[in-house]
Amino acid sequence: MTTPFKTDDEIRAVVDGFEQCTTGKTEFTHLSHLTVATFYLRTSSRKQAFRKMRAGLLRFLKHHDVPLEKYSDEVTLAWFQRIQEVLAKLDSGAPLVTQVNTVIGNLADWDRGRPARNAP
């Protein structure tokens, strides 16, 4: 598997596109969700990260005229838990790009109902 990101700037571009709603709804993929959630969890407390993710997803859905019922606190919290389980296995000082790529490598296939090879 090739690594999705080579630099922190590439990760920040995904986060910025999400926050500013400049990313199209079909371009905001499962990998984008994992990227943003990991970024928030690494740069904020879990509580703050959840608030940012929740607000951002609701804003994104509204901006793209997607029914808000598509959002679920329970699903978001479950993904945060999975991401944190992957991050707990890494050195907390690992570069952001390493952390995001590791989360993606471990959880990318969960959206298809099956864990990736190294998933927790």
Image (cartoon, grey):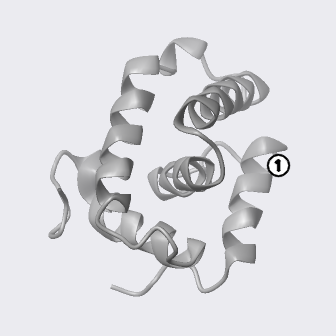
Residue 110 appears left or right of 18: left
Q: Is residue 112 above or below residue 6?
A: above
> Depth check: 31 or 11 in front?
11
Q: State the quadrant of the C terminus.
A: bottom left
Q: Secondary structure at mark 1?
A: loop
At 28% from the left and 66% from the top, the residue drawn is 89
> Residue 100 in the image: x percent, y percent?
49, 67
Total number of numbered discs in the rendering: 1
Q: Which residue matches tag 1?
A: 22
> Residue 90 in the image: x percent, y percent?
36, 70
At 66% from the left and 26% from the top, the residue drawn is 61
Label 1 neighbourhood size at 10 Å, few (<14), some (14-19), many (20+)?
A: some
Q: Is residue 6 above or below residue 35?
A: below
Q: Is residue 36 above or below residue 69?
A: below
> Residue 10 in the image: x percent, y percent?
70, 74
Residue sitting at the far top: 69
> Residue 31 in the image: x percent, y percent?
48, 58
Q: State the quadrant of the N terminus.
A: bottom left
Residue 68 appears left or right of 73: right
At 38% from the left and 60% from the top, the residue drawn is 87
Which amino acid does the dot numbered 1 rest on?
Thr
